[in-house]
């Protein structure tokens, strides 16, 4: 018993000693940060610190602060509280890792400008204003396994046209499923091959987003799937006008082609996620 207490005492001392190391020292010794993450103006320690700027790909997170939550060690986890603020928005989350080496986020709440996400739809000629609210109850991942539950709200979106055109607000409910990924450019199949593909068991984890409008000028129902192994995505949506839909938006809907018998317009697309996503 005394040996275990001594071991625990030494381990705790070394662990908190590491936490007290300057954050810049660890970045120099064990950097660079993964997946194109860059940090600037780092101050403080691993236990508590601040970065003037953290950048991943095109996205910039300003005034990022972190605080270690020591009580989480009792449950076999090491958890940090992270807050960021900047011109593009603000947010906070709890990020940690468990003894089973499972990384996770929880209680994540982010509010950023729609314009900050324009790199996601850069090929499209579309300039939107408004806010994106990201609320994740939890997100955990280990190797190729991901578990996620939350929602994304597009709030008060406005197309920067002349005159400006309001598209209202939309909700994307997020979770994870097992799905068969569709190739970005599917090859031609024989009838027997198509029959076999329909009977295949789901083989790949995917993030699913169920898309609905929130009393906007256009009703929308759709689904977005982002496949984690094949790095592909696909979206299928259905739009239809409400009685109060402005004529300008009705004209935009007509660009999607002819509606079906119920007056619904369909649109779908697929593509490739960045290789380092």
Image: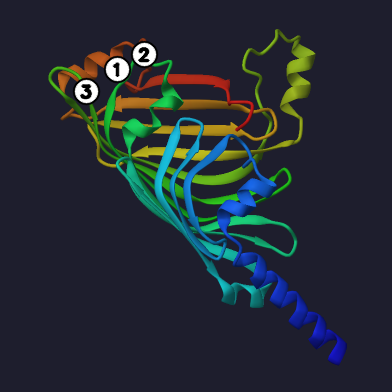
> Can residue 140 be seen by looking at this rendering?
no
Whether 189 is drawn above or below 30: the answer is: above
Q: Which residue is mark 1?
A: 253
Are there few (<14), some (14-19), or many (20+) residues within 10 Å of tag 1?
some
What residue is disc 2 on? 256
Q: Residues within 10 Å of mark 2 (few under 14, many from 20)?
A: few
For residue 24, above or below residue 254: below
Foreground label between 1 and 3: 3
Q: Position of residue 58 (x, y in %)?
A: 46, 30
Q: For mark 3, what is the residue?
A: 160
Query: Closer to the N terminus: mark 2 or mark 3?
Result: 3
Judge from the rendering whether residue 262 lies leftward or rightward of residue 66; answer left or right: left
Residue 28: x and y in percent read 63, 46
**Residue at screen point 16% across, 24% down:** 164
Task: Measure the C-alpha gap from mark 1 to mark 3.
Answer: 17 Å
| Secondary structure category for the residue under label 1 | helix
Asked if residue 236 can be seen in this view, the reply is yes
From mark 2 to mark 3, how far is it between C-alphas?
Answer: 20 Å
Mark 3 crowdedness (10 Å alpha carbons): few <14, some 14-19, many ≥20: few
- Asked which secondary structure carries label 3, the reply is loop
Between residues 30 and 103, which one lies in front from this camera angle?
30
Marks 1 and 2: in contact by CB < 8 Å?
Answer: yes
Q: Position of residue 21 (x, y in %)?
A: 61, 63
Residue 101 in the image: above or below residue 190: below
| Residue farthest to the bottom, as pictured | 2
């Amino acid at each position: 018993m005394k040996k275990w207490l001594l071991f625990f005492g030494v381990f705790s001392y070394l662990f908190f000693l590491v936490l007290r190391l300057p954050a810049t020292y660890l970045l120099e010794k064990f950097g660079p940060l993964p997946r194109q993450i860059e940090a600037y103006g780092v101050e403080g320690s691993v236990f508590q610190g601040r970065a003037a700027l953290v950048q991943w790909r095109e996205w910039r997170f300003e005034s990022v602060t972190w605080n270690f939550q020591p009580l989480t060690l009792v449950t076999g986890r090491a958890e940090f509280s992270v807050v960021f603020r900047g011109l593009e928005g603000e947010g906070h989350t709890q990020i940690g890792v468990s003894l089973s080496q499972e990384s996770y986020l929880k209680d994540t709440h982010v509010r950023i400008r729609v314009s900050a996400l324009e790199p996601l739809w850069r090929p499209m000629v579309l300039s939107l204003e408004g806010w994106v609210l990201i609320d994740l109850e939890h997100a955990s991942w280990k190797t190729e396994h991901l578990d996620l539950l939350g929602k994304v709200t597009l709030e008060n979106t406005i197309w920067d046209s002349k005159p400006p055109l309001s598209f209202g607000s939309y909700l994307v409910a997020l979770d994870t499923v097992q799905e068969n990924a569709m190739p970005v450019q599917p090859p031609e199949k024989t009838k027997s091959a198509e029959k076999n593909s329909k009977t295949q068991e789901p083989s790949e984890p995917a993030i699913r987003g169920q898309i609905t409008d929130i009393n906007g000028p256009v009703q929308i129902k759709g689904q977005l799937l982002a496949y984690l192994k094949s790095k592909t995505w696909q979206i299928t949506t259905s739009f239809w006008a409400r009685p109060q839909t402005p004529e300008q938006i009705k004209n935009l809907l007509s660009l999607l082609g002819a509606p079906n018998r119920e007056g619904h317009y369909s649109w779908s697309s697929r593509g490739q996620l960045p290789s380092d996503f």
